[in-house]
Amino acid sequence: MEECHQSHLAIWQCPPFLFLIMGFVTILAMLGSFMIASRYIAEPEIAALIVIFIAFLFIILGNLIITGFNRIALANRMKTEFVSIASHQLRSPLSIFKWTLEILQRRGYAEAPEKTEDFMRTLRETTERMIRIVNSLLEVSRIEAGVLMLKPEIFNLSQLTDDIVKRFDTYARASGIVITHTPNQTLPAVTSDRERISMVIENLISNAIQYTAGSGTIKIIIEHPDGYLRWSITDEGRGIAPNQQLYIFGKFFRADGAGGPHTRGTGLGLYIAKSIIEASRGTIGFTSVSGKGSTFWFTLPIHK
C-alpha cells in the first residue's frame, strides 16, 4: 500500500487492494454459482446471464489491476529516469567544480593571483548552473506528479519583461546581439505566478541568444488582443529543422544548431515553459524557418 501512496494512486487503483477484492469476489462467485445451479437448474438461461455478468465484472477488475500496475511501473520508470538525468546533468559541472578547486589548492592563491578571479568566476558560474539544473529537475518532478502549484498575483507583464531584458543585456551584447523591447505601462495587468512566468521569459530569451549564431537582433513584442496578452520573441538565428519541430516542447529535447559553448542545457526549459503557461490558462507556440530564425510566443489572460 505504501508504494501506491508514493505513486499517488487511490486505494481503489492499488493492485494489492484490487487483488483482495478479486479474492473476495471469487469466493462469492463460487458460492453464488453453487446457489444458482441448485435453484435455477431448470432455467439455464438465467444462470448463463449471471455467469456472464460475473465474468464481465472480473474483466473490469482485471483491467483496473493492469492499469494500476502500469501506473506504478510508470512512476518507477520516471523515478529511475529522474535519477539518471540528474546524475548525467550534474556530472559535468561537478567535474569542473572539482577540477577548479584542485588547481586552486595545488597552486595556491598567491602563486597565481592573476588567475584567481577567473577561477572564482568559473566556480560561481558552475554553481549557478548546478542550481539551475536542480531547480529544473524539481520543477519537472512537480509537473509529472501533478502538483505544480501556482501562486497567482497581479503584475505588469511589460515591466517584468523589461526587468529581465536588462539582466540579459550585458550577456547579449557580449555575443553581438541586441535585444529590443519597448516597455508599455498602459497594457492591462495579468494574473499569474510572477516567479514562474519570469522563468518562462528567461528561458525564451536565453534560447534566442544561444541559438543566434554571431550578431543579430532579438525583438520582443507584447500585444493586446481581446481578453489576453500575447508575448512574442523573434530571433535571427538558425531556426529549427522541420523534422525537429514536432518535438520542441518535449522533455529533454534539444534542437540542433546551438551556437557557441554556452548552450549546454538540460532540454527541459521549453517543456517546463509549456506546462507553466498551460497551468496559467494560456497557450504557447512557435513558428520557425530553418536558416532564418524563430518566433516563440505565449498568451496569458488579462486581469479582470
Image: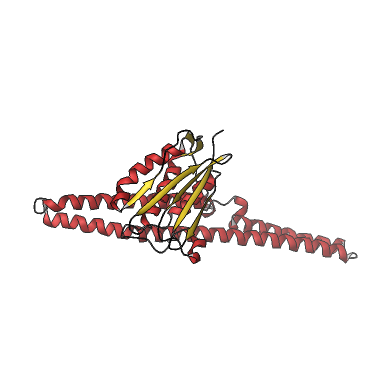
Quadrant where the C terminus sits is: top right
Answer whether residue 169 is visible to the viewer in this image.
Answer: yes
Towards the viewer: 5 or 206: 206
Q: Which x, y percent locates residue 8? A: 54, 51
Q: Which x, y percent locates residue 296? A: 47, 52
In the rendered image, which quarter is residue 212 located in?
bottom left
Q: Which x, y percent locates residue 30? A: 75, 62
Q: Which x, y percent locates residue 170? A: 30, 46
**Colouring of the image:** secondary structure
Residue visible at 31% across and 53% down in the picture:
176
Towards the viewer: 156 or 31: 156
Where is 192 relative to 213, above or below?
above
Answer whether residue 248 is visible to the viewer in this image.
Answer: no
Where is 267 relative to 199, above or below?
below
Residue visible at 63% across and 52% down in the picture:
12
Where is 49 relative to 270, above or below?
below
- Residue ranking furthest to the left: 111
Report whether 246 appears left or right of 166: right
- Residue ranking furthest to the right: 42
How many labels, in total? 0
